[in-house]
Amino acid sequence: AQSVTQLGSHVSVSEGALVLLRCNYSSSVPPYLFWYVQYPNQGLQLLLKYTTGATLVKGINGFEAEFKKSETSFHLTKPSAHMSDAAEYFCAVSVGSGGYQKVTFGTGTKLQVIP
Amino acid sequence: DAGVIQSPRHEVTEMGQEVTLRCKPISGHNSLFWYRQTMMRGLELLIYFNNNVPIDDSGMPEDRFSAKMPNASFSTLKIQPSEPRDSAVYFCASSPRLGTGDVYTFGSGTRLTVV
């Protein structure tokens, strides 16, 4: 069975500072990994995903994440936080089983950006 | 495409009443998912369908919950009778198929309050 752990349910950064949101996964087979973002009163939307190939993945709004197999991590980063980045971020792992994928979401990290 | 459409956006009902939540997936998407989001439990997968057939309903909390997908463009989640602990935001999501790595598109959710 796969699982996802997001370290820190709340993270605060100053505007312009580095954003680092941590995600560690557990999977017995090579996983596909995702980051989704949820703005207030909205559904989740895809930020980026890792399937195979290049381990550094670039997403929308300047975010990127690096797949590190040795550390079983998929941390999300952005060099400079903007006020509009305030949202909740979910890491997710997808593993195929019997022809179907099973996606497991983390518990989410709320990002606060301080002016 | 208008995305995944959920209705109503907000629902307030009295304990014991029947509640029906509705979802229209993205045209051409073959898989549909119902999630529940609360502060305490985070994002929980309730049930998912592939080609209108329920694949896994192990996340449905009780027999009071039921879901149907009569055709490729419509699904309902029904709670009968409703209880205050059912208060949550319910999300519907769709994806092209259940293949590993497929991206989920979420609706804006239905905020349910049972008083």
Image: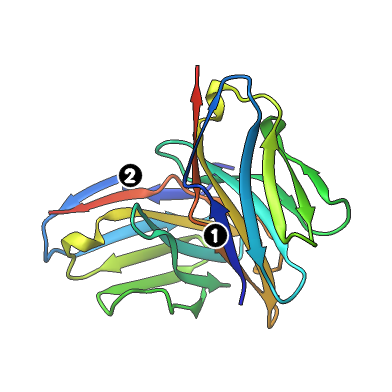
Spatial CA span between label 2 and label 1 = 23 Å
Residue at point 50%, 45% (across, down): A109
Callout in the foreground (2, 1): 1
Residue A58, by quadrant, is top right
Residue A41 against residue B87 in the figure, above or below? above
- B108 or A89, which is in the foreground? A89
* Quadrant the C terminus of chain B occupies: bottom left
Dot 1 amino acid type: Phe
Q: In this view, does B14 lie to the left or right of B7?
A: left
Relative horizontal placement of residue A50, taking residue A38 as reference (left or right): right
For this orientation, the residue located farthest to the top is A115
* Image point (70%, 79%), residue name: A99
For mark 1, what is the residue?
A105
Number of the label disc, if any, that sits on residue B20: none
Numbered badge on residue B9: 2
In the rendered structure, which amino acid carries the disc numbered 2? Arg
Q: How crowded is mark 2: few (under 14 residues within 10 Å), some or many (20 or more)?
A: some
Q: Position of residue A9 (x, y in %)?
A: 47, 47
